[in-house]
Amino acid sequence: MRLRAPTVFEVKRFKRKLRSPLEWLGIRLGMLIFANISHRRLFRLCDALSCVLYAFDARGKKRALENLRQIFGGSGPMTRREEIIIRGSYRNMARTVGHVFWTSKLARERVAEVGEMSDVCREWLQREKQAVTVSGHIGCWEILAQLVHLEGLEMISVAKRIGSENTTAMLMASRRSIGEEIVAADGAFKSLFSAMKQGKSLGLLVDQPVPANKGGVWVRFLGRPMPVSAAPAFFSAKFKAPIVTAWSRPLKDGRYRCELINTYRPEEARDVWAMTQRCTRDLEGVIRRHPSLWVMNYNLYSNIPAEEDLDTLAEREAAHRS
């Protein structure tokens, strides 16, 4: 009897099944160990783990180098400066994931201990009450919504699925430990719409590609076309809520400060493409200044624009330059 070769989908599903128990074990150990050590020891452990990940993540390093050179240019073998920046990116990513586990215990006390909100950001949020908050995977992005929650504002955030359903569920539980509301990215629109009707704020990360058939619009990110979520502009215009772009800056003492980048009035969001491009450029500015604080090993440019997409993008850019 002739055996049929497995399809690509079947191979990927089999690999996921093999990986699922390891993911579950890793998260359980992370919650057990990381939640019961000091913040200083957390950083030391995360830094060590980031070195291990850097050593074995060949595909991720390749993507990181490609994205880094999208910012600064370059070719050939990785330079020493590029290696330092990419190692810093892995370290920042590991510290942020560690923060999720660390704050799964005594969340309010720990977030207040290691995080603060700038006076400008606090005053703006308290004045507006409801807003669409936009950020990216820069600094400790997990602490942003936590700090907003400590300020007494109701916010709903979106998180993508990571690994298996069990893995995602455990990570979601850790992220919700402070009391914030988080929904899965798949099918999030209904939950976000309902939250805005109730007067809640939104927390959205927009530095990753979102296909046009899932609510993305083509903008230019780090000089290249990429489809980005239009959700911030849509919800801002629909519910007349202002947009604020922000990020969490790591401080020298190991703490984080939430800093405001820019704010936009709801009427500015009526031009969905222009607002999406503005938010993207706000984040891009921080990334260019602090590349080692950005998670750069994502496959950002996997979506290939059609000719009509490029033509539309060029027309929109020309219209806004005139």
Image: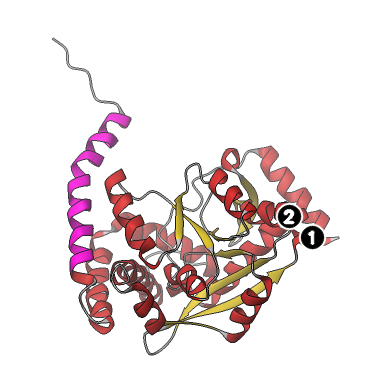
The spot of residue 205 in percent (x, y) is 52, 60
Crowding around mark 1 (Cα neighbors within 10 Å: few <14, some 14 to 19, many 20+) is some
Q: Is residue 227 visible?
A: no
Q: Quadrant of the N terminus?
A: top left
The spot of residue 193 in percent (x, y) is 61, 48
* Image position of 291 with respect to 268: above or below: below
The spot of residue 106 in percent (x, y) is 31, 74
Residue ranking furthest to the right: 322
Residue sitting at x 25%, y 25%? 6
The question of residue 297 being in magenta is answered with no
> Which secondary structure lies at badge 2?
helix
The residue segment tinted magenta is 9-32
Residue 237: numbered disc:
2
Q: Is residue 48 visible?
A: yes
Among numbered discs 2 and 1, the one appearing first in the sequence: 2
Three-letter code, disc 2: Ala
Q: In this figure, which residue is indicated by the disc labeled 1? A: 267
Three-letter code, disc 1: Glu
Residue ranking furthest to the top: 1
The question of residue 23 being in magenta is answered with yes
Q: Quadrant of the C terminus?
A: bottom right
Residue 318: numbered disc:
none
Side of 199 where 185 appears, left or right:
left
Side of 195 where 23 appears, left or right:
left
